[in-house]
Image (tube, rainbow, N blue to C red):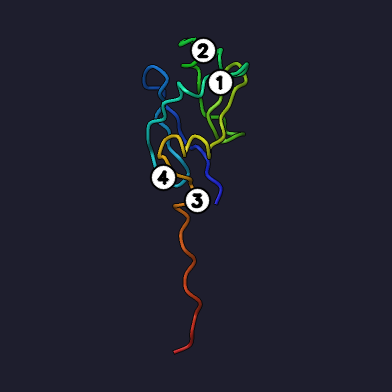
Amino acid sequence: MFIHVTSVQYLTDYKYQIEFSDARKGVADLEATLWGPMFEPLRNPELFRTGKLSDTLETITWNNGADLAPEYLYELTFGESPQTHVAEPPPPYSAP
């Protein structure tokens, strides 16, 4: 199962409320993520607040071109991989 971001809402500081395609919703604190040439500019609060959902990439993107993988956001938000919530396949059919 591939996970996608379905909605994002800026909250405060470096936090966004994020909803995922498995219907789970939580808060991601992205402050520790903001390092390196692409993400350090997002330490500017005005730029950080420009985060929005990209319908094309199905994740959060910013005006400077930065984006984060949905799987990374999921793990950051919930502390676990999205694969832990994949439904188990039904047992094989056996005739009565």
Q: Earlier in the sequence, mark 3 or mark 2?
A: 2
Q: Residue at x 47, y 74 (%)?
A: 91
On residue 83, the disc is 3
Quadrant that contains the C terminus: bottom left
Q: CA distance from mark 3 to mark 2?
A: 32 Å
- Residue density around tag 4, few if under 14, some if 14–19, many if 20 or more, within 10 Å: few
Q: CA distance from mark 1 to mark 3?
A: 26 Å
Q: Residue at x 58, y 27 (%)?
A: 67
Q: Earlier in the sequence, mark 2 or mark 1?
A: 2
The spot of residue 27 in percent (x, y) is 38, 31
Q: Earlier in the sequence, mark 4 or mark 3?
A: 4
The spot of residue 45 in percent (x, y) is 45, 11
Q: Tag 2: residue type? A: Leu
All told, the count of numbered labels is 4
Between residue 54 and residue 79, name the one nearer to us.
79
Q: Which residue is mark 4?
A: 23
Q: Mark 2 touching mark 1, by CB under 8 A?
A: yes
Q: Which SS class for mark 2?
A: helix
Q: Which residue is mark 2?
A: 47
Quadrant assignment, res 62? top right
Q: Mark 3 touching mark 2, by CB under 8 A?
A: no
Q: Which residue is mark 1?
A: 62
Q: Earlier in the sequence, mark 4 or mark 2?
A: 4
Q: Earlier in the sequence, mark 1 or mark 3?
A: 1
- Residue density around tag 3, few if under 14, some if 14–19, many if 20 or more, within 10 Å: few
Q: Tag 4: residue type? A: Ala
The spot of residue 82 in percent (x, y) is 48, 46
Discs 1/3, front: 3
Q: Earlier in the sequence, mark 1 or mark 4?
A: 4
